[in-house]
Amino acid sequence: MTVSGSQRKAALAAQAREELDALAARGVWMAGNGYSSVVLVKGELNEGERAGAELLSGRDGDGLRAALSRQGFAPEDFCGLAAVPSPGSEPTADAARGGDGVLPVELFREALEALDPEAVILLDTTAIGLMREAYADALAAIEDFDTAMLTPGRIAPVLGRRVLPLDGFEAALGNPEDKRRMWHYLQRLKPAAAPY
């Protein structure tokens, strides 16, 4: 039996959808395009998100999409991933191991690997802390201490991905100086060159 290219693509897409649905059932909160080259990790939810609004559907999501579009990323090329369990999700055996209200390290890493982005933007200190814990082994291999510690504004190479930590993107929107600093950090992250 011969399998066509379109059948193979459809099977791979169905497998990826099943994997993401299984993660969502375990409390992983994602929004946007799961096939994106950029994943935005948010740990400090705003009032709307805590009340059930979609992740990154507010001012911060609009600002990030606009800033990254100016950098050359496609407008649809963004996926949000919460560093905390989705509101109203039932704690699973995984979630019981997550401390301080964040996703369990193993579950966060599994979700990020399933999304398999080229770049990761950590939007706040909660997201930075979870990334440090989940990828401690890869970060320990980085020679520059500040980069290995995910100091805001420094791009860290983590298992073939570029990771840009920000220290409170949403909060920075209310302060012109902080907003300029975030824009300066985001300007460092350009789309990867085509592999051909």
Image (tube, rainbow, N blue to C red):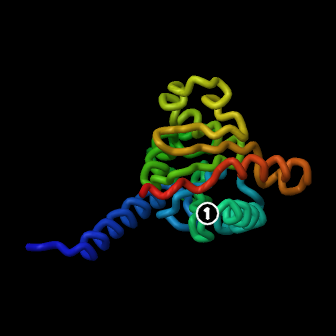
Q: Which quadrant is the N terminus positioned in?
A: bottom left
Quadrant in which the C terminus appears: bottom left
How many C-alpha atoms fall within 10 Å of the one at disc 1: few (<14), some, or many (≥20)? many
Q: Is residue 95 left or right of residue 165?
A: left
* Vertical side of 58 occupied by 38: above or below: above
Splitting the image into 4 quarters, where does residue 130 fall? top right
Between 61 and 54, the one lying in front of the other is: 61
Question: x%, y% of residue 161?
Answer: 51, 45
Q: Position of residue 47 (x, y in %)?
A: 77, 60
Is residue 170 visible to the viewer in this orientation of the structure? yes
| Image point (52%, 42%), residue name | 104
Can you say whether 123 is above or below 130 in the image? below
Q: Is residue 81 above or below residue 99?
A: below
Is residue 49 shown to the viewer in this render? no
Residue 141 falls left or right of residue 88 = left
Where does label 1 land, which residue? 73
Q: Please report the residue visible at 86 percent of the width from the left and 48 percent of the height from the top.
A: 178
